[in-house]
Amino acid sequence: MTEHSCTLPQFKPDNASETTTTQALLTPPPEEQEQPLDQTQDHYHDHDQDGEDPPAAHPQPDTTILIEDVKTYLSTLFFRQTLRLNFIVSTVLDFLHAHPVIATLLLAQLLCSCVPIGLFVAGAVIVASLAVALYSCVAVLVLAPVVIGTSVLGFCVWGWGWVAFVVGKWVLGWLVDGERGFNLDGDLEVEEDRD
């Protein structure tokens, strides 16, 4: 059985040394290289001395950077998964080529077992879907009247609260005014004018 590596193959010319190849791979092209920080500061400093504002930097919008980050992450993720899948497939194929009797036995078992297992899974999914639909219908039949009843009850409690507040305010006003000019008998006490 052969060993497979999960790392990328390293391609380099036959006449190149190890350090120059690594250096060339790690060095970005000149258009992607950033200016050193001190050169950028001197450039803006010269503009400040002339009385001009520094030129507006044209940073990339945040959405562009975010999209590039997502694309890089997804391509790296899919690339790793592809490498892992290639490794697994090549290992399985090596095993199947090395042991053809076991390979044919596993293939026959897989072909014969797929039909009943597939029918069982399909039946289980259908029955589960029907059970969820039936349970949802029963839940709506029970829940709808309960929600309507509690809504009516809440409306009644709210209405009775306002009625009690208005009647209580009226009764309290009547009692307070009664101390000024009413008896509990309901007779009006008239204050006599003093001349």
Image (cartoon, rainbow, N blue to C red):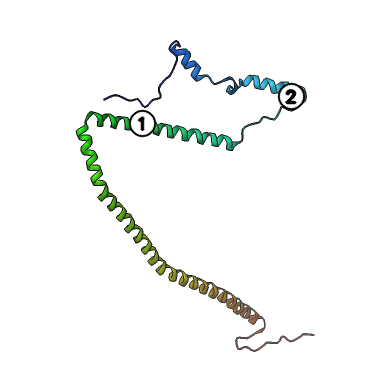
Q: Name the quadrant of the N terminus.
A: top left
Of 65 and 173, which appears nearest the observer?
65
Mark 1 residue type: Asn
The residue shown at (22%, 42%) is 109
In the image, is residue 144 above or below residue 14?
A: below
Using the rendered view, name the quadrant where residue 13 is placed. Answer: top left
Label count reads: 2
Residue 114 position in % (x across, y down): 27, 46
Is label 1 in a helix, a strand or a loop? helix
The residue shown at (46%, 72%) is 149
Residue 115 position in % (x across, y down): 26, 49
Of 167 and 76, which appears nearest the observer?
76
The residue shown at (58%, 78%) is 167
Which residue is labeled 1 in the image? 86
**Mark in the foreground, 1 or 2:** 1
Residue 174 position in % (x across, y down): 63, 80
Which residue is labeled 2 in the image? 48
In the image, is residue 22 above or below residue 100?
A: above
Q: Name the quadrant of the C terminus.
A: bottom right
Task: Tell which residue pokes out farthest to the right in this image.
Answer: 195
Mark found first going from the N terminus, 1 or 2: 2
164 sits left or right of 177 in the view: left
Residue 47 position in % (x across, y down): 73, 23
Residue at mark 1 to residue at mark 2: CA–CA distance: 58 Å
101 sits left or right of 19 in the view: left
